[in-house]
Amino acid sequence: MPYPQVILPQADAACGKTFFADRRTADDHRVGLEVWNRATGRQRPGYRLSVYRCRRCGGFHLAQRPVPPPPAAPAPPAPTADEAERPGAADWMADEAGEPSPGPSRPHFTAPRPHLRNRTSGSVSPTPSP
């Protein structure tokens, strides 16, 4: 019974690009090339390296593809009447609006902390011998 012949990818000189037989190897080289480009200052803003399958040779190559800009962040929701009446609501509403906060709405705990006290050297004085 004859087996079907699988068309294997072969390096083609007409492509003029580095040939990778499988996607995993190409992806490993992409990661290494990204590190190299970042270290040598060759990283282009707005572009990233990607792996693609070549139609001509059937292998995989690396290319720089443009990255779409990130979507704009949505505006924060307007506070409801219940949220505006809560204690401390003025602080977080002012922060979201970009205005300086009038200060904390409740006093902060300012008790002395024993672990921050200035301690003595901790040396033990010798006891007098009898």
Image (cartoon, rainbow, N blue to C red):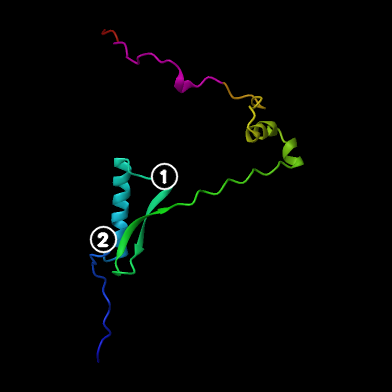
Q: Nearer the viewer, residue 74 or 119?
A: 74
Q: Position of residue 28 (x, y in %)?
A: 29, 56
Measured as percent of width and height from the top left, residue 13 is found at: 23, 65
Label 2 neighbour load within 10 Å: few <14, some 14-19, many 20+:
few
Q: Which quarter shows the N terminus?
A: bottom left
Q: Nearer the viewer, mark 2 or mark 1?
A: 2
Position of 123 compared to 12: left or right? right
Q: Nearer the viewer, residue 33 or 128?
A: 33
Q: Quadrant of the C terminus?
A: top left
Residue kind at label 1, given as amino acid type? Pro
Instruction: Classify residue 50 by image quadrant.
Output: bottom left
Q: Magenta segment, principal secondary structure?
A: loop
Residue 115, magenta (yes or no): yes
Check the image and report above or below for 30 versus 108: below
What residue does disc 2 label?
Answer: 16
Q: Secondary structure at mark 1?
A: loop
Residue 27, disc: none
Residue 45 is tagged as 1
Disc 2 residue type (three-letter): Gly
Q: Please count the marks in the image.
A: 2
Circles 2 and 1, Cβ within 8 Å, touching? The answer is no
Secondary structure beneath dot 2 equals: loop
Mark closer to the chain start, 2 or 1 = 2
Q: Residue at x 56, y 21 (%)?
A: 111
Binning the other alpha carbons within 10 Å of mark 1 as few (below 14), some (14 to 19) or many (20 upward) gives few
Residue at image position (26%, 74%) is: 8
Q: Is residue 82 left or right of residue 63?
A: right
Instruction: Report the magenta residues as a range.
Output: 111-126
Q: Position of residue 109 (x, y in %)?
A: 59, 24
From mark 2 to mark 1, how far is it between C-alphas? 25 Å
Residue farthest to the bottom, as pictured: 1
